[in-house]
Structure formats: C-alpha cells, structure tokens
Image (spheres, grey):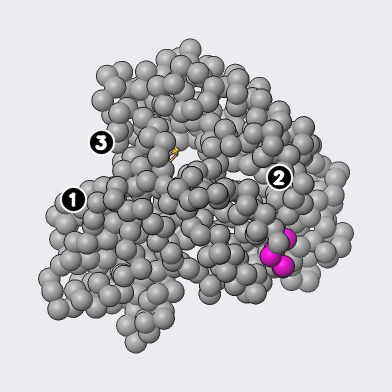
C-alpha cells in the first residue's frame, strides 16, 4: 500500500483542508502516516500569511524530499497559490496546486507518475464556486472545525489572503448540514464554524446569511455546542446578538479580530470599524451574555505605528479586558498596499511591543479566569493531560481550558465542573456530574 504524509502550516482552514485531502487519499487506497515517517507521497499544505509561513513552507518541502528522495512531493495552499514560480524553483517538487482544485490531488499524483512535474495553479480571482470538500472520518471526537466559507473581499492593507484565497464563496447550507449530521453521528459534540471571512457568509448567495447557518446547525441532534471562529466584529448588530443569545447551543465566546486599538492605525490598515464601535459591540455582547469571553488578534509594528499609537492599543486592551489575545508582528507581504508604506517599523521595536502586549494579555487572561473561581461550568473534555498526569483537560463554553483529576475516563464527555483554583494560567476544577 502506498504511504502518504502531510505537513500542514497555518490556520484552522488549512487544517480542515488537510483532513479532507487525507480522506481523499485514504479512499484511493493510500495509508496516511506521520510526516516524520518515510512516505511515498508528501503533501505540504502551505501558508503565506507571514514571511515565516513562506520560509517554513520551503523548509518542509526540502525536508520531505531529504527523508525520501524517491517520494513525490505535492505543494498546495496559500504559498503555492501566491508564489507558484518560487515553489517550482525548489528541486524535487512534482505537483503544485493552489487553493482550488485540491479535490483532484490524488488524480494529479497519479498523473505525475507519467510526467515530470505539474503546475496546476490557476487564477483564483476567477473562481466563483465554493469547492466542496468533506470530512467524515476525522480523528478525535469532541470538537470539529467545519469550513463554511472561502475567500475574502476586504483587502486589509497588510493582508495577502484575498490574493491567496480569492473572492468570497459560501458553502451551501444543505452541504453544511449534511456534514454536521455526519460529524454528530461520529460522536462530535462541538462544531466550530470556520472560514476565511466567516462574517461574509451568504453575500454571494441569494437570501442566505450566517444566522441561518447557525440556526440550522442548532437543530442538529447530538450537537451540544456551536462556536464561531474568528469573526469580523461589525457583524454583531443589536439584532444578530439578540438572535444568538436565544440559541442556547451558541458558546458565549467570540473571537473578534481587533488588529489595533488605535483609530489612526485601523484606518491605515483599511479595517472597517473604529475602537468606539468595537467597544459598543463588546458591551452589547456582555449585556446579553454576562460571562462571555472576548478573544482577539492584535498586530504590532504596522507601518507608521508610533509609540503613541501603540500606547493607545495598550490602553484599549486594558479597557476591554480581553480573555485571550493572539499577538503577532506585522510582516511585509509583497503585493499588499502596506508593503509600499515608507515608514516601516524596525524589528527591535516590533519585538519590544510584542513582549509588552503579551505580558498585558497574560494579566488580562488571569483576571478573566479568576472571575470563575468558585463557580460551576460545563466542560467538554478532550484528552488526558500530558503535563499533569491523572488530570483530564477540556474547554468550558466560554473558552476556559480546565484541568480536572479523575479516575474514570472523561474524554468526549460533557461534565459539570466546580472551578476551584487558578495558578498562573492553569485553571483546575473538580467533577460534579456527568451531563
Ligand atoms: S478580513 Fe482582512 S485580515 Fe481578514 S482575511 Fe480578509 S483581508 Fe485578511
């Protein structure tokens, strides 16, 4: 039996697509092995969101070829889509696919056995249909990422993604629900709706919107939780929040992408909201769902970000009190508007700002967790902890990772837990009852 190994870089959407490609190979008789093993085919699902993503993508292509010089190498995903010539120049690459047509990956691998190399990257801007790829046999049985949307039309000035993923395409509700039912039958309890720009769902379809998707998933028996992955804050209108708060399976956790807490920076980033509007949205969510967790992404060192502008971001973070922040440094991406801005920030300043913000984020996170000590919360347990033997770990609906000692296995179980202590970032609980 032929062996295939995958290496996936980047976001949850890429991970979802890797799972879907794995199933395609398995259906064609391949055996999926770990990327550290020797395989006949290596698929590198690349990322281009930062320079580091590009570099790592290239490293893994070379590493795979070294592992088995006779193997076939397929390079797919965002880096392959935006820089196919660079990928072509790497010795040993056999198939190059971008962010479309990944459904045909097995066919391309079979075809390339007869040819030297295939570059199948097309013009992503011309793609108007969502490429339907499904997952049904995925490993793990608690939380499943479900891709409902592709592409982005926002063109934030720093971001390469619209060029890598193309225009927005929404998946049909019927196809989404078919997949949710299959996941539920496999025992999954939590669905995380994901995409490149989830808030745009339905804008390319007639009479469809994200709320309808959430409501339809809500109806599926066996699904206990629905979570939204990163989402544009502006979708959280009064009406939308009201509807969400009436759907008990919707987790009180929203990852509202902020990027900067300074209006001048947001404007240069071409983000479509101000900090004042963002604050109104957070307050609205907190009024409807008092325990809600607000998590976010913040970029430091965007071109022209002065000390004063960065200080505004720190103050805004203190004001909002996020429960978790993903901090990342601006990375110049060729082809984007911001790459041409003259006042690029040096890497020393970016590092200092990043450290400062990470420290503040840590404090905010502890503050949020402390609010729940002495309260009861439902936890969906996933695994036995590697770092704390005898403890199981899982997530509350409001995105607190909880450790709990137990002699009976807790994997895949939804359990009511009393939150006892928090030490550093670890939250420890005691079992109350199975739900
Ligand atoms: S919304 Fe902005 S940051 Fe997000 S994918 Fe689209 S262009 Fe990139």
The answer to whether residue 134 shows anywhere in this view is yes
Secondary element under disc 3, as helix, strand or loop, is loop
Total numbered circles: 3
Q: Say whether disc 1 or disc 2 marks the residue closer to the N-terminus.
A: 1
Q: Residues within 10 Å of mark 3 (few under 14, many from 20)?
A: some
The Cα–Cα distance between marks 1 and 2, rounded to whole angstroms, is: 45 Å
In the image, 114 versus 343, the foreground residue is: 114
The residue labelled by disc 3 is 334
Residue 37's place in the image compared with 263, above or below, is below
The Cα–Cα distance between marks 3 and 1, rounded to whole angstroms, is: 13 Å
Residue at image position (77%, 46%) is 246
The stretch of residues the image draws in magenta is 220-224
In the image, 113 versus 102, the foreground residue is: 102
The residue labelled by disc 2 is 244
Q: Say whether disc 3 or disc 1 marks the residue closer to the N-terminus.
A: 1
Question: Magenta: predominant secondary structure element?
Answer: loop
Q: Position of residue 147 (x, y in %)?
A: 50, 57
Q: Quadrant of the C terminus?
A: bottom right
The Cα–Cα distance between marks 2 and 3, rounded to whole angstroms, is: 39 Å
Q: Position of residue 419 (x, y in %)?
A: 81, 48
The answer to whether residue 77 shows anywhere in this view is no
Determine if the magenta segment contains residue 222.
yes
Residue at image position (67%, 44%) is 253
Residue 42, picture quadrant: bottom left
The residue labelled by disc 1 is 86
Respond yes or no on whether mark 2 lies under 8 Å from ligand 1: no
The answer to whether the residue labelled 1 contacts the one labelled 2, judged by CB atoms less than 8 Å apart, is no
| Outermost residue to the top | 308
Secondary element under disc 2, as helix, strand or loop, is helix
Residue at image position (49%, 27%) is 272
Q: Say whether disc 2 or disc 3 marks the residue closer to the N-terminus.
A: 2
Secondary element under disc 1, as helix, strand or loop, is helix
């Amino acid at each position: 039996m032929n062996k295939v190994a995958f290496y996936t870089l980047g976001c949850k959407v890429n991970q979802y697509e890797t799972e879907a490609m794995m199933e395609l190979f398995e259906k064609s008789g391949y055996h999926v092995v770990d990327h550290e093993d020797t395989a006949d085919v290596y698929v590198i699902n690349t990322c281009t969101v930062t320079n580091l993503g590009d570099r790592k993508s290239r490293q893994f292509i070379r590493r795979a070829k070294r592992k088995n010089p006779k193997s076939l190498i397929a390079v797919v995903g965002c880096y392959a889509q935006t820089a196919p010539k660079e990928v072509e120049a790497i010795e040993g690459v056999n198939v190059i696919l971008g962010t479309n047509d990944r459904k045909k990956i097995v066919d391309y691998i079979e075809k390339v056995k007869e040819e030297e190399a295939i570059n199948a990257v097309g013009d992503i801007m011309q793609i108007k249909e969502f490429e339907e790829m499904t997952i049904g046999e995925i490993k793990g049985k608690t939380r499943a990422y479900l891709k409902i949307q592709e592409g982005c039309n926002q063109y934030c000035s720093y971001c390469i993604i619209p060029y890598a993923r193309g225009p927005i395409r929404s998946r049909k509700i019927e196809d989404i629900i078919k997949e949710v039912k299959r996941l539920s039958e496999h025992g999954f309890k939590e669905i995380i709706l994901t995409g490149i720009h989830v808030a745009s769902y339905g804008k390319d379809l007639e009479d469809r919107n994200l709320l309808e998707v959430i409501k339809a998933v809500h109806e599926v028996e066996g699904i206990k939780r629905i979570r939204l992955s990163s989402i544009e804050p502006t979708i959280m209108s009064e009406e939308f929040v009201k509807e969400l708060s009436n759907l008990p399976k919707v987790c009180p956790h929203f990852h509202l992408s902020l990027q900067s807490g300074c209006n001048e920076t947001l404007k240069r980033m071409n983000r479509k909201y101000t900090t004042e509007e963002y604050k109104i949205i957070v307050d609205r969510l907190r009024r409807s769902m008092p325990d809600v967790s607000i998590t976010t992404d913040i970029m430091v060192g965007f071109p022209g970000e002065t000390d004063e502008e960065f200080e505004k971001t720190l103050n805004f973070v203190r004001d909002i009190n996020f429960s978790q922040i993903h901090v990342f440094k601006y990375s110049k991406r060729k082809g984007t508007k911001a790459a041409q801005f003259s006042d690029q920030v040096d890497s020393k300043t970016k590092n200092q700002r990043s450290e400062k913000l990470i420290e503040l984020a840590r404090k905010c996170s502890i503050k949020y967790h402390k609010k729940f000590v002495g309260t009861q919360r439902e936890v969906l347990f996933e695994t036995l902890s590697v770092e704390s033997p005898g403890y199981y770990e899982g997530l509350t609906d409001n995105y607190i990772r909880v450790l709990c000692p137990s002699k009976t296995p807790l994997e895949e179980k939804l359990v009511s837990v009393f939150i006892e202590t928090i030490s550093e970032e670890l939250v420890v609980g005691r079992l109350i009852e199975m739900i």
